[in-house]
Image (cartoon, rainbow, N blue to C red):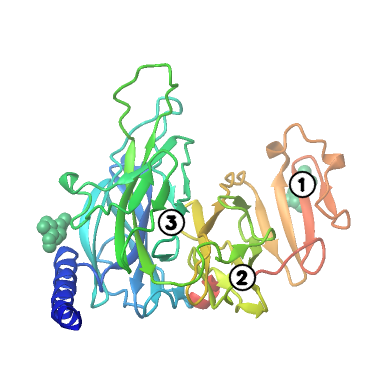
Amino acid sequence: MLGAWTRRLPLLSLVLVLVLVVVLVLDPTSGASTLGLTVAVVPLDSDGGQTVRAHFTSISAGSCPSLSGLCPEGDDCLLHRTSVPFTGTRPGSGWCVRQWQRTVSSRYSANVSLGSDTEFYVSLNATPKVRANSGRLNQPVFVALPPPLRARVNCPHHFHLSVKDPDGDKVQCRFARPERGECLSCERRPFIELQEEKCILFFTGKAAAGQYFIHLMVEDLIPVPKISHVTNNSPLSSVPLHLSLTVEESSTSCTDEPLASSETPAEDSVMFVLPYEQIKFNIHYISEAESVSEVAVVGPPELYRTDLTSVGPLAALTVSWTRSENQLARLLPICFVANTNSLQSEPRCVWLYQREMKVLPSGTELKCGKSEMTLVLPVTSLSNINLAELQLNSPTCPVSYNSTHLTASISLSGCGTKTVVTSLFLEL
Ligand SMILES: *[C@@H]1O[C@H](CO)[C@@H](O)[C@H](O)[C@H]1NC(C)=O
Ligand SMILES: *[C@@H]1O[C@H](CO)[C@@H](O)[C@H](O)[C@H]1NC(C)=O
């Protein structure tokens, strides 16, 4: 018996080595690839959508890579050199988020190098389509990028992917296809399934411990009623979503994961943000089995996060974001997960929506004094409004008017005036 075992063992390790070599050969991206990537694509009206502004968010394994080389000389390109990048310690040796934006062709594919050892291939298709219902350019889907996903051997798990289509189109997620030039090394795994219509990833649990990469395309389609026999409802656009799933060995039960408490904003919820408004919310987790070691967040540049406070099974973090003048996309996802030593909560994503503002009527003037601001509006811009009943949010702020102009005096220390410090000034 013993002899049989000793003979079998070297064979077993040889098989293991072979498997490892095969994995490394098949997946040249492992070790130095992105642990996640998405691109928010905004068609530019100025050239009829022939070019788009592509907002990249990428998660690199290890320490934060340099941003150099991402913006070719003379390109319309912006690097988000954020003061406190989004980072995490799990899985493996940690990760770091990098964000930048670039004007590229509406049909774009490229090999992108990030720092010295991250390289990835990205492909998107947003060739311009004018919508029959609005006469405006179609907007591709916005896709939220969660922090790197973790799961456990033999623990089946669903991952809901958060997507928003600005035009209200039907959205579907599908695996990227190498024959269409959507990915280079994108091996399909039998233990990763996808509900295309609902954008839900399903991990069956039947996988060896290891790191797996998932390349998806997210598409928008004009919704058609089921009864109409439209067979060729082709997608309007396709944007990439790359994810990583790290499968770990674990002895804890499959149901012990940290849970978000009811104070945490609901999955997929949208918060509307006015110019210079500050949005603030709390993220709370309850974890009975193991204490939460980090709440990992991926969100827009300059999203402020407090340190994690952890008391017994409770862990909490506050995040806030102030809208200053920016060139970011209109819809901004914020995704978070709680990590413990061997467990991870469901990823959850919420959205910030930067409200579009009406252009101020010509003749509007805002003067800043030492202790107050004076706003002067031409009365012609205020049709159907009874000027005598008009007041600011606080009735203590005086509003006066004559035949041509309305004048509001706004105290800097009253009237509900809030002081907002934006990083714009620090960068200048
Ligand atoms: C990216 O790299 C791959 C292989 O290294 C190559 O086949 C492909 O043509 C490149 N694609 C682009 C768009 O540069
Ligand atoms: C009305 O008020 C504005 C702002 O104070 C002033 O500039 C303007 O001359 C006034 N118009 C008349 C007709 O008094």
Query: Which one is in front, 248 or 338?
Result: 248
Q: Residue 156 got which mark?
A: 3
- Residue occupying the point 64% across, 72% down: 316
The answer to whether residue 369 is visible is yes
- Residue occupying the point 62% across, 51% down: 272
Asked which secondary structure carries label 2, the reply is: loop
Mark 1 or mark 2, which is nearer the start of the sequence? 2
Give the percent coordinates (x, y) of residue 212.
30, 63
Mark 2 C-beta to ligand 1 under 8 Å: no
- Residue occupying the point 43% across, 16% down: 227
| Disc 3 crowd, CA 10 A, few/some/many (<14, 14-19, 20+) | some
Give the percent coordinates (x, y) of residue 330.
49, 51
Image position of 392 (left or right of 62)? right
Image position of 98 (left or right of 289)? left
Q: As shown in the figure, which amino acid type bears the numbered disc 2? A: Ser
CA distance for labels 2 and 1: 56 Å
Q: As shown in the figure, which amino acid type bears the numbered disc 1? A: Leu
Q: Which residue is mark 1?
A: 406
Residue 102 image-quadrant placement: bottom left
Q: As shown in the figure, which amino acid type bears the numbered disc 3? A: Pro
| Disc 1 crowd, CA 10 A, few/some/many (<14, 14-19, 20+) | many
Mark 1 or mark 3, which is nearer the start of the sequence? 3
Give the percent coordinates (x, y) of residue 297.
51, 68
* Quadrant in which the N terminus appears: bottom left
Image position of 66 (left or right of 164)? left
CA distance for labels 2 and 3: 19 Å
Residue farthest to the top?
A: 228
Q: Residue 287 got which mark?
A: 2
Vertical arrangement, residue 34 with respect to residue 395, above or below: below
